[in-house]
Image (tube, helix red, strand yellow):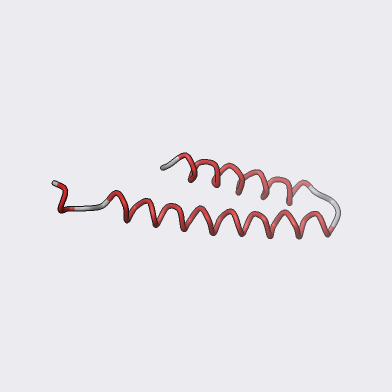
Amino acid sequence: MSKLAWLLLCLTFAATLLGLASTAQDDQTTAFIASAVFGSLLLLTLIVGRRIKFDPILR
């Protein structure tokens, strides 16, 4: 995984924990929305990274 993917994984994990630990409804909603955004960006980063690394012509 790239450094960007690791960063997004950590941000997703931190936002999820913040949402679970928060008591206010607004804070939970904001944290879970941030977690969903970071998770989506992580998935996109992993897909793009896989496409760039896989090139059978270079062998």
Name the spot of residue 38 as percent of width and height, x first.
59, 54
Query: Which of 22/31 is in front?
Result: 31
Task: Farthest residue to the right: give it.
Answer: 24
Horizontal arrangement in the rendering, residue 7 relative to residue 14 (left or right): left
Name the spot of residue 4 as percent of width and height, x first.
49, 44
Name the spot of residue 27 as percent of width and height, x first.
80, 54
Q: Is residue 52 above or below residue 10?
A: below
Horizontal arrangement in the rendering, residue 52 relative to residue 41 (left or right): left
Query: Which of 48/16 is in front?
Result: 48
Query: Which of 8/32 is in front?
Result: 8
Q: Residue at x 80, y 49 (%)?
A: 22
Q: Residue at x 69, y 46 (%)?
A: 17
How many callouts does the rendering have?
A: 0
Q: Residue at x 54, y 59 (%)?
A: 40
- Quadrant occupied by the N terminus: top left
Query: Which of 4/43 is in front?
Result: 4
Horizontal arrangement in the rendering, residue 44 relative to residue 26 (left or right): left
Task: Farthest residue to the front: give it.
Answer: 58
Q: Residue at x 72, y 54 (%)?
A: 31
Name the spot of residue 39 as percent of width and height, x first.
56, 55
